[in-house]
Each structure stands twice: as structure tokens, then as C-alpha cells.
Amino acid sequence: MATTWTDADPYAFVDAIAHPVRRRDGFTLIELMGRATGERPRMFGTSIVGFGEYRYEYESGRTGRSAAAGFAPRKAATVVYLGDGVGTHAVSLAELGPHTTGVGCLYLKDLGAVDLGVLEAIVRASYARLTAGTHHGDES
């Protein structure tokens, strides 16, 4: 089943996070991503706070829609989703501060330890690329 937008309240979702750093970071990201995208936060599925939407198409022909920017508070770290891939942001990531990455995921344990201006610029650039047209991604 594909993940879809829900009517759940993203502020209530973040407020219910037990981990105090994840909760604080969640409210910070709602504000930061709202500025970076110009979009209001919405729940994408049950655990992702998303902003805006983009269409993707893989070489296999598979298509879909997803949040153009978003984050999910997880036990070990908050995940910031970069649908255009973390490699696109290598120079900025070198200036961000402590983080780890996956193909399209940026893992942050504490936003207090990173440069929020750099993070906002990364989110803004990723959002702009993803919403410029159909994103042709890699299914791996």
C-alpha cells in the first residue's frame, strides 16, 4: 500500500514525541521546512511530516507522488528526506555539522549541533529541484 497524505495534525504528532530532543527538533524542522518550501506541514503516512509534493518516475516505468520535503523522528535520529539524493548536496553537507547519510536520507541526532542555515539551504535546494518537474530517480 502506498503512503498517502492524511488529515492528522503534524503539530500534535510532534508534540506527542517522547524523546525531548526529537520533539524539540521536530518543532524546529516544521518551522525551518515551512520557510524553505513555502508549504504548510502535513502528515504523509503515520510518521512523516511532509511539505509539498513531487512526482517521480523510475526507469522501470514506476511512477508516484511523494512529499517534496519532509522529516521523521526516529529512535536513533531524526531523518530528513532528500528526494534528489544526498550526493547532490555534498558540498553543503560538508559544512552542516554532525550527521550521517543514506541514499536519500540525512540522519541528525541533535539539531543544536548543526548549522541550521546550511540545513535550510539544503532543504530549499532539494525542494526546488524536486518540484521543478518529474524527478527521474534511482529505484535502488
Image (cartoon, rainbow, N blue to C red):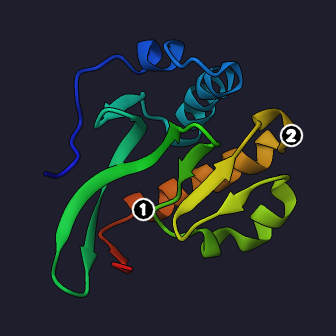
Q: Nearer the viewer, residue 100 or 129?
A: 100
The quarter of the rendered structure image containing the C terminus is bottom left
Against 137, is 47 above or below?
Answer: above
Q: Which residue reaches farthest bottom?
A: 59
| Distance from Cα at disc 2 to Cα at disc 1 | 27 Å
- Residue carrying label 2: 113
Q: Position of residue 80 (x, y in %)?
A: 57, 48
CA neighbours of label 2 inside 10 A, class few (<14), some (14 to 19), many (20+): few
Give left or right: position of 55 versus 29.
left
Label at residue 26: none
Q: Where, by quadrant of the figure, is residue 106 drawn?
A: bottom right
Q: How many marks?
A: 2
Mark 1 lies on a secondary structure that is helix
Give left or right: position of 129 versus 114.
left
Q: Amino acid at mark 2?
A: Ala
Q: Earlier in the sequence, mark 2 or mark 1?
A: 2
Q: Position of residue 36 (x, y in %)?
A: 58, 41
Q: Where, by quadrant of the figure, is residue 44 drawn?
A: top left
Give left or right: position of 50 versus 32.
left
Q: Position of residue 42 (x, y in %)?
A: 35, 29
Instruction: Please give the name of the residue rendered at 78% of the width and 40% of the height, measured from the top-left corner.
Output: 116
Q: Amino acid at mark 1?
A: Leu
Q: Where, by quadrant of the figure, is residue 137 drawn?
A: bottom left
- Residue carrying label 1: 130
Against 63, is 53 above or below?
Answer: above
Mark 2 lies on a secondary structure that is helix
